[in-house]
Image (spheres, rainbow, N blue to C red):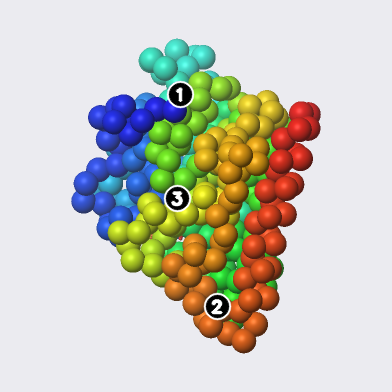
Amino acid sequence: MTTSIKQLPDNEQVLSGNGACGGCPATMALRIVGKALGPNAIMLLTPACAVASMGMTPRLGYNWPCINITFASAGSSASGIIHAVEIMKEKGRLQGEVPTVFSWVGDGGTYDIGFQALSAAAERNENIIHFCYNNEAYSNTGVQRSGATPRGTWTTTTPTGKRQPKKNMARLMLEHNIPYVATATVAYPGDLYDKVVKAKSIRGMKYIEILAPCYLGWQFDMPETVQMSRMAVRSGAWLLWEAENGKISFNNPTSHIISGKKEAEPVNEYLMKQGRFSRLLKGPDAAERMAEIQGDIDREIAFMRERAKITI
Ligand SMILES: Cc1ncc(C[n+]2csc(CCOP(=O)(O)OP(=O)(O)O)c2C)c(N)n1
Ligand code: SF4
Ligand SMILES: [Mg+2]
């Protein structure tokens, strides 16, 4: 049974007065992650909105020891920290439980700039959790395209809409044969919470990616953040799944789409709600480009349906 929002614990690791935009989906997700991890954790951050949001020393918006590192080095820095704390524990220089070491990194820092170190940490099966909060762009620097930006999206570096499909980072992490990979999003907080609790209990490398619809980059009204997250899942543009030791299972409502019990909603309504697609959808080739986006989604659903049958 998925934990309900009412059952989430009261502890808060994200403090009030931090500098995130009101209603920021990444911060919303971090609150839930904090409830699952608790206070005994060390957080690593690469340059991103999450860093700009945390405030200026000596004030801090997050209730953990936080380390700001370079864009490229989340995987290697987190590896160093977990080795250090585990050795301290071994030598009796650390009392109590070894803290959870986790990276909180955007899609730019995960898909693109930090990929090499992350892939290497996964191959070494380091005992860390890498979270990617995916707002599908480099938001903190004014919305540039990333490897996570879907086809058709306007960004400042794709003014006529990105021509290429996004890559599937969670699937790439799965192919590293690590013990746990999961996807989540803010409209399903219990699902995210349960996945983080599970990840915390597993030794080795864990990767959790959270779709975070950012009103600023996606250009919709901020109160619709959760609705946008829900529409992404219902249209199949974002699939909720997890893989323990390579075995994939799907979570509701994605499981109904994968099993064929329910059809994914057509993507049009989801796209039309977002200003980042508006130029595209008003153009002369709108129907063709919308069909391309729908094609990307249908292909991914079909692929995951088949991929889930393979256990490595
Ligand atoms: C090597 C390097 N290149 C570029 C930058 C500038 N920069 C700071 S934050 C940022 C965007 C980060 O994007 P993402 O990781 O997706 O996080 P988001 O801003 O969307 O939260 C960029 C490009 C940097 N700090 N270091
Ligand atoms: S720009 Fe988007 S991701 Fe960044 S703080 Fe604002 S709402 Fe959050
Ligand atoms: Mg981003």
Q: Kindly indicate the quadrant of the structure image that contains residue 206.
A: top right
Residue 237 higher or lower than 10, as above or below? below
Question: Residue at position x 58%, y 22% from top?
Answer: 203
Q: How many marks?
A: 3
Going from N to C along the chain, the mark reached first, 3 or 1, is 1
The reply to whether residue 249 is visible in this rendering is yes
Circle 1 sits on which residue?
1
Circle 1 Cα neighbour tier, 10 Å, few/some/many (<14 / 14–19 / ≥20):
few
Residue 270 higher or lower than 180, as above or below? below
User: Residue 281, which numbered label?
Assistant: 2
Going from N to C along the chain, the mark reached first, 2 or 1, is 1
Q: Kindly indicate the quadrant of the structure image that contains residue 43.
A: top left
How far apart are the two marked residues, 2 and 1, measured between alpha carbons?
40 Å
User: Residue 230, which numbered label?
Assistant: 3
Circle 2 Cα neighbour tier, 10 Å, few/some/many (<14 / 14–19 / ≥20):
many
Question: Residue at position x 39%, y 54% from top?
Answer: 227
Residue 162 located left or right of residue 44:
right
Circle 3 SS class = helix
Relative depth, front residue between 279 and 93: 279
Q: From the top left corner, tell me how far across and down residue 250 is, in percent.
A: 60, 35
Q: Which quadrant is home to the N terminus?
A: top left
Q: From the top left corner, tell me how far across and down residue 42 is, in percent.
A: 42, 34
